[in-house]
Amino acid sequence: MGVVVASEQPRSGAGPEGALHRPDRRPASWEDRFSTIYRLLPYVLAAAAVLLAMVSGFGAARMLWIGGAALVTVAWVCWFETLHPQWERERPALATFSLLVRLALTALLVVLNPWWGLFAWLGFVDFFRANLLGGRITTGIGVAVTAALLAGTQVGGFQNVSGALVGAYLVMLLLNLVLAGTMGASFTYVAVRNEQRRVALVELAEANRKLSETLRENAGLHAQLLTQAREAGVRDERARLAREIHDTIAQGLTGIITQLQAAQRVPDSTGYVQTALGLARDSLGEARRSVQALRPPQLEDATLPVALRRTIEAWAEREAPRATLVTTGTARPLHPEIEATLLRIAQEALANVARHARAARVGVTLSYMEDVISLDVRDDGVGFDPAAATPADGCRPDPAARGGAGPGDGGSPVDDAVVAGRRDGGFGLIGMRQRVARVAGELTIESEPGSGTAVSATVPAVPAGAAA
């Protein structure tokens, strides 16, 4: 696999830098350099052998034979190996024929001129690296003949292979065969490494392709996740504002309406109007804090137990039922979101008591334990049946929908409270559950018609300064 870099071709008349700029040229490897040198080597060695023959004092007739055979051999190498190198890979039969003919010409030249052994050893390289018909058999024959030719030249020529030099010839033949075997092993090793590299490059190209596809898929998935995260953030912010509005502003407006209705029924309404004004100011502050996602004002300058006590006292003064707060365990600073959650749960539970329970007494218990904090709000009001609540919205059931009387129609106090809870939209219970779930807590509601209600919230005791 290669990387194609597109660039502008140099114009004619460009300087040296333009002449050297070749965008399609890759750096030459050692194999490329060896191939270039090896293609020139036969001509160099053939010329050296001819020159050595000329200074060796051979006769004119023998030199004529040597010169003629050398020209035929050089022409053969030029045609088959220099001008058509692709035949070596693409046409095995023609490559085999070419090498065998060249080997025969080399044998003739070695017999005529022992110096031609300089050229003969090229047979080792060619028979090992060429794509030949017959495979190892053809390669073995070519290597053995080449080793025999080299051994003859190493003892001074085949005319000297007689008597005592026969043993020397056999020794040289054995050494040449060992040399050929070593060279063959080296060529095999290089071929295996080249094949491994080729396979690795193919696998790398495939891995790069898959990586590119994965990156494109990840880019699409990342964009999708960003969109989903934005949508989830919008939903969470809407839910937060809805809870804040219900737990603060809606309760304040309800209190204002109650105070103004009471003011209409008495001659001196100054106290009710002042209370309504105070509730309006508090609701305005809560609205601003809800938009800015700030802590409840009760917790700005007080601990959670103190903020709860103040909240309960203000609620009891406004709503009349007797309310008490009991704190157990060692009070300690908690994460702001944990404290805000517990305070909002207490406010919503007290608001539900005021709207629906018709209770005479309310008890609030804040328990500091080792790993969790629990808040319990109990009243002795009319209660309701939790099993009959609608799971989807957490609302109390509407008895009128089942044929019961509505408020003001002669129904029981329990039914009136239940219908009022239905008109409230049930968001109070949903909001409490969402708040507790947001901090990995648990909310339980225990109630029974005529026996009051108990709301219990348990949240992790995350210390102040820790990540929620």
Image: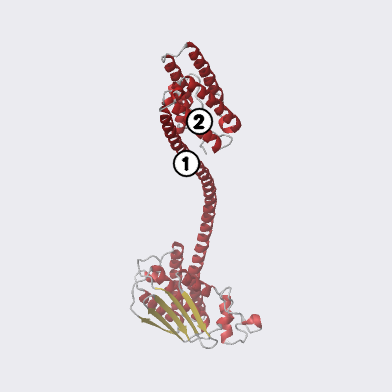
Quarter of the figure with residue 27: top left
On the question of residue 375 being in view, the answer is: yes
For image coordinates 34% across by 70% down, the residue present is 301
- Residue 362 locus on image (x, y percent): 45, 84
User: Mark 1 falls on what kind of element?
Assistant: helix
| Viewer-proximal residue among 389 and 176 | 176
In the image, what residue type sits under mark 2? Val
Q: Which mark is residue 193?
A: 1
Quarter of the figure with residue 440: bottom left
| Viewer-proximal residue among 117 and 333 | 117
Q: Is residue 383 above or below residue 306?
A: below
Q: Within 10 Å of the Cα at label 2, are there few (<14), some (14-19), or many (20+) other Cα atoms?
A: some
Q: Within 10 Å of the Cα at label 1, are there few (<14), some (14-19), or many (20+) other Cα atoms?
A: few
Tell me the residue that label 2 is attached to: 145
Q: Is residue 339 left or right of residue 95?
A: left
For image coordinates 52% across by 60% down, the residue present is 234
Quarter of the figure with residue 375: bottom left
Closer to the eye: label 1 or 2: 2
Q: Is residue 267 above or below residue 36?
A: below
| Viewer-proximal residue among 310 and 32 | 32
On the question of residue 24 being in view, the answer is: no
